[in-house]
Amino acid sequence: MATTSSQTVVQTSSKTPRRARDLVAVNIGNAIEWFDWNVYAIFAPFFAAQIFRAQDPVSALLATLAIFAVGFLMRPIGGWVFGLIADRKGRRFSLTLAILLAAVGSLIIAVAPTFDQAGVWASAVLLLARLIQGLSHGGETGSAFTYLAEIAPSDKRGLWASTPWIGVALGTMLATGLGVLLTSVLDQQEMSAFGWRIPFVVGALLGLYGLFLRFKMAESEVFEANKEEGHGLSLRDTWRVLVQNRRAVLNIAILSVSGVVIFYTWFIFAPSYATRVHGVPASDALLAGLLGQAVFLFAVPFAGALSDRIGRRPMVFAYTIGFAVLAFPLEWIMGPSGLRVFISMAIASLILALCCAPLGAIFTELVPTRVRATVVGITYGGFSAIFGGSAPYLNTWLSSIGLHNLFIGFTILLCLLTLVVCLRLPETKGLKMD
């Protein structure tokens, strides 16, 4: 018995560094994915008139944001396809393939022709690249949440499953920081002529590094232990599985919608909005956005660890109440200075962290192992596509016709829906993964 216990301790201790390395590999890759995804939104004002007709800048920007939204339509398909791959071939294989496609999408945008060079074919190339990235991004999210929750120590699952959001923050901050650098070095004409291509080249190169890291990852032991029970879903079985897990699907869907709308509104789109509506210089707005995103970066692991102590539900509850109360005040704080942009983004980031941090653990704890990546990927990817992908476009359009307050009311309504689900949600902290 003593020998067996000793062997168990040695095996467990030897697994800890391996798990930690895999956690880092997933999140570096996740950061690269989010860099690839978000440079589009950040640099859209600079390349919109290059890809579409330049005569009407607002129309060109709306068309660019429409393709941003269309890219989201591939996310549920990506969640489905990569979920099937993850539940059949393993989480590691799915994550490696996802980052490869993200890099390919960035490379296509980096070399895309302009409207003057190719006419409408320029927008077709841009659309193709975003569809590829949307497919990849939909696969990344479900697989990353699933993998990290499965390799995490049971008493730290909330913390470990929150770390993809650190990758989100790092990738977005890298994209925003590059925007600060480029807009400081290059003038508006240079940014529109060639500067906007630079971040997409960087994204393609970073993708190669992420690919190397993920090749070295180990497979999830939970997946290995359960893969004999089934070899993943066939296409015709997917709908049946979603119906069988409809309560989990509904919970994941409603928990997702308010968070993704607020995330893309305050975490990604806010600097661009401040420049266009409040006249904040682009470099100042991007710097303020970078600092606001840093607040989220540091808040997420604390919120994840807190969810392991007090549970998942109290965190989501605090987020829904907090943002519903502060939605309009945050808009009033934002104004024609970088400082005001930072303060509003920092407060929004703190509240958003309360929601985002426990979501990975909640999602994976609601779904059984053999279909986990598929259900989480399809549901989260689908509702992110519908609500997150349309948020920048809807915000821009409503603002252009003087109805921005209607968009704020929409975010409050989504928070209240999340609150209703949170009140009925079972507490999943400490649940055994099966």
Image: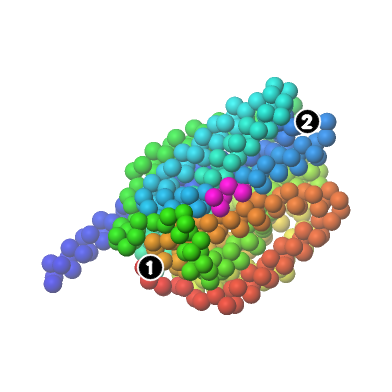
For badge 2, the amino acid type reads Arg
Query: Few, some or many C-alpha atoms within 10 Å of disc 2 (few <14, some 14-19, many ≥20)?
Result: some
Residue at horizontal 33%, vertical 52%?
A: 219
- For image coordinates 59% across by 36% down, the residue present is 129
Total numbered labels placed on residues in the image: 2
Disc on res. 107: none
Q: Quadrant of residue 382?
A: bottom right
What secondary structure is the magenta-colored segment mainly?
helix
Residue bearing mark 1: 433
Cβ atoms at labels 1 and 2 below 8 Å apart: no
Magenta stretch bounds = 72-77
- Residue placed farthest to the right in the image? 402
Q: Amino acid at mark 1?
A: Met
Residue 386 spot, x, y in % from top left: 65, 55
Q: Disc number at residue 53?
A: 2
**Image quadrant assignment for residue 229:** bottom left
The answer to whether one can see residue 163 in this image is no
Give the mark nearest the N terminus, 1 or 2.
2
Q: Residue 161, position in %: x, y?
A: 46, 60
Residue furthest toward the front?
Answer: 236
Give the secondary structure at mark 2: loop
- Tell me: 252 left or right of 403: left
Residue 64 counted in the magenta span: no
**Considering the numbered disc 1 on the image, is that residue within a helix, a strand or a loop?**
loop
For the residues labelled 1 and 2, the Cα–Cα distance comes to 53 Å
Specify whether 93 is left or right of 195.
left
Q: Is residue 108 left or right of residue 229?
A: right
Q: Nearer the viewer, residue 149 or 53?
A: 53
> Which residue shows up at 80% across the image and 49% down it?
397
Left or right of 411? Residue 231 is left
Identify which residue, 298 or 14, lies in the foreground: 14
